[in-house]
Image (cartoon, rainbow, N blue to C red):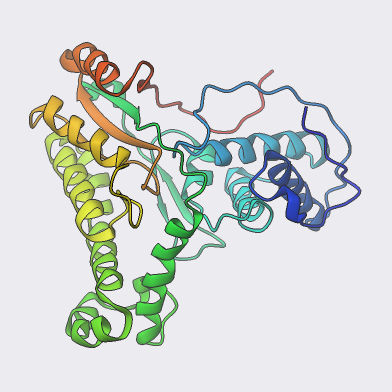
Amino acid sequence: MCTIDLDDMAVREEEINTTASLIRGVAARFVSMGCKVGGFRAVASSTVLPGSGLSSSAAFEVLIGNIINHLFFEDKADAVKIAQIGQYAENYYFGKPSGLMDQMASSVGNLITIDFEDQEKPVVKKLKVDFEKTGLKLCIINCWASHADLTDEYAAVPVEEQKVAGFFGKKVLREVPKEMFMEAIPQLRKEFGDRAVLRSIHFYGDNDRVPMQVEALENGEIDHFLSLVKESGRSSWMYLQNIVPLGANEHQEMAVALALCDVLLKDKGAFRVHGGGFAGTCQAFVPEEMIDAFTQRMDQLLGAGSCHVLNIRPVGGTVVG
């Protein structure tokens, strides 16, 4: 049982990185919007792996957000607002500087693309794609290393990219033309080091790849989509460097999981790190005819229950009944 006193909406140091902080944070944000949050009891069950890069905290935030929205706010908050409320709780109460993507995916549901240029009003588009007809299965592979204690690793990525943007007097790299960034690489390396430059190169590459992936999916060009997934995965490993935590030698669980995907898929399908990386899970798009052999072999090599075949739900957070 997780019990929260809703008369006290202040951030509590002892609740950082706990479920209680997420409940209190979501409730606090609703209160700031004029919602009169009252008491309630809820029982929750989940098959989402906690602390494994599968957006378990985002899914929980969206759940609590939908409960409060329905019971006490007349369902006035839409899916985007509930996602933003969840991000607020995670950033300020849970203590993790996450972006908005996980919460948005959990809240909106289905295959979506999101433009975050205006974070207050992100542009969300549901893709007209029936994933079941692609001949692929989406798998999540647990590498059995928790990302719960890797907040500093995750935080360093946006911090380094924002420092590079600041060199040009901008807040984020999106505001800096790629050509201008490329010309300044010698000065940027001296000012911020090589890793910051490499991570920025990944940003520009992935920012270009996203619309191409969307177009490929919507046009039924599955092979092109898979090639872009592979490109993004390689870029994450080489440039973003979010596969192996700093200084890790003996334990490189994510790298091993990705290497096994590479060996088992044999140039079929695609694979890449999932979420923020460093630990947690990787994702694989596996041809249907290979799925049984792939899951069985992955469980043999990484341990029983390592490979999970997912279904893509057409809706996100919602009230049933």
> Could you say which is closer to the camera, residue 46 or residue 129?
46
Q: Residue at x 32, y 80 (%)?
A: 192
Residue 165 is drawn in which quadrant? bottom left
Residue 254 image offset from top left, x and y in percent: 30, 40
Is residue 99 in view? no
Is residue 311 in view? yes
Residue 49 image offset from top left, x and y in percent: 49, 28
Q: Residue at x 35, y 52 (%)?
A: 245
Q: Residue at x 18, y 36 (%)?
A: 259
Residue 23 is drawn in which quadrant? top right
Q: Residue at x 40, y 26 (%)?
A: 312
Residue 283 image offset from top left, x and y in percent: 30, 34
> Could you say which is closer to the camera, residue 272 or residue 107?
272
Quadrant including the N terminus: top right
> Could you say which is closer to the camera, residue 199 or residue 34?
199
Q: Is residue 243 left or right of residue 24?
A: left
Direction left: furthest residue: 267
Q: Is residue 297 above or below residue 254?
A: above
Q: Is residue 42 left or right of residue 178?
A: right
Picture mark count = 0
Residue 123 image offset from top left, x and y in percent: 46, 55
